[in-house]
């Protein structure tokens, strides 16, 4: 699109015009500004993308660690529950007591990890993350 003002021709900003090859775009005062702005925005997008990739890697590592921390006490509790279920009457009282004590300790670990996750989630919500 062009408009004539006296003898000067003025080029309105037009996306189709901007997408033309540079040789076909003549005398637009806004082109250097647009190029500078596009470069600035592209740099900002690249930096944001890099930060997002780093955050995703950290989140993945955190979740893998948490899964390990959660699975370990649960596997211990499950294994001892199976032993008690299958061999309860055959086990000596001191061994049964030891198994129950280990199950209680691992249950406490699991509860502590769960509370830590809830607290971390709440602090992320409060921080606006």
Image (cartoon, rainbow, N blue to C red):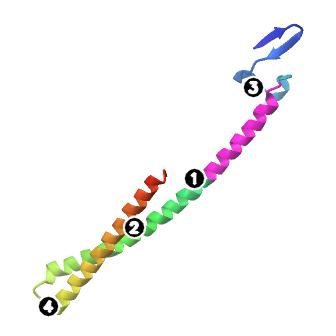
The disc, 4 or 2, on the residue closer to the chain's N-terminal end is 2
Earlier residue among tags 3 and 4: 3
- Location of residue 93 (image quadrant): bottom left
- Considering the numbered disc 1 on the image, is that residue within a helix, a strand or a loop? helix
Which residue ends up furthest to the front in the rendered image?
126
Q: Secondary structure at mark 3?
A: helix
Q: Earlier in the sequence, mark 3 or mark 2?
A: 3
- The segment highlighted magenta reads 29-50
Taking the spot 25% from the left edge, 74% from the top edge, the residue there is 78
Q: Secondary structure at mark 4?
A: helix
Q: Which mark is residue 67?
A: 2
Q: Which callout, 4 or 1, points at the residue further toward the start of the chain?
A: 1
Q: Is residue 28 above or below residue 98?
A: above
Q: How many marks?
A: 4
Q: Residue furthest left?
A: 89
Q: Is residue 118 visible?
A: yes
Q: Could you say where residue 65 lies in the image, as x and y percent from the top left?
A: 45, 69
Q: Which residue corresponds to mark 4?
A: 93
User: Residue 117, relative to residue 17: is it above or below?
Assistant: below
Quarter of the picture containing the N terminus is top right
Please give the residue where the numbered disc 1 appears in the rendered image. Answer: 52
Quadrant for residue 122, please give it: bottom left
Asked if marks 3 and 4 touch (Cβ < 8 Å), the reply is: no
Label 3 sits on residue? 18
Residue 11 relative to residue 67: left or right: right
Name the quadrant containing residue 98: bottom left
Spatial distance from mark 3 to mark 4, Cα to Cα? 85 Å
Q: Give the answer, above or below, for where 126 lies relative to 83.
A: above
């Amino acid at each position: 699109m062009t408009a004539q003002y006296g003898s000067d021709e003025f080029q309105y900003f037009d996306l189709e015009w901007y997408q033309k090859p540079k040789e076909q775009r003549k005398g637009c005062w806004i082109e250097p500004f647009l190029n500078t702005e596009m470069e600035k925005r592209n740099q900002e997008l690249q930096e944001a993308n890099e930060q997002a990739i780093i955050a995703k890697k950290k989140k993945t590592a955190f979740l893998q660690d948490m899964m390990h921390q959660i699975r370990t006490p649960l596997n211990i509790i499950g294994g001892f529950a199976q032993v008690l279920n299958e061999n309860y009457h055959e086990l000596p009282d001191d061994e049964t007591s030891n198994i129950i004590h280990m199950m209680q300790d691992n249950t406490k670990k699991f509860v502590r990890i769960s509370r830590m996750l809830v607290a971390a989630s709440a602090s992320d919500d409060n921080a606006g993350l």
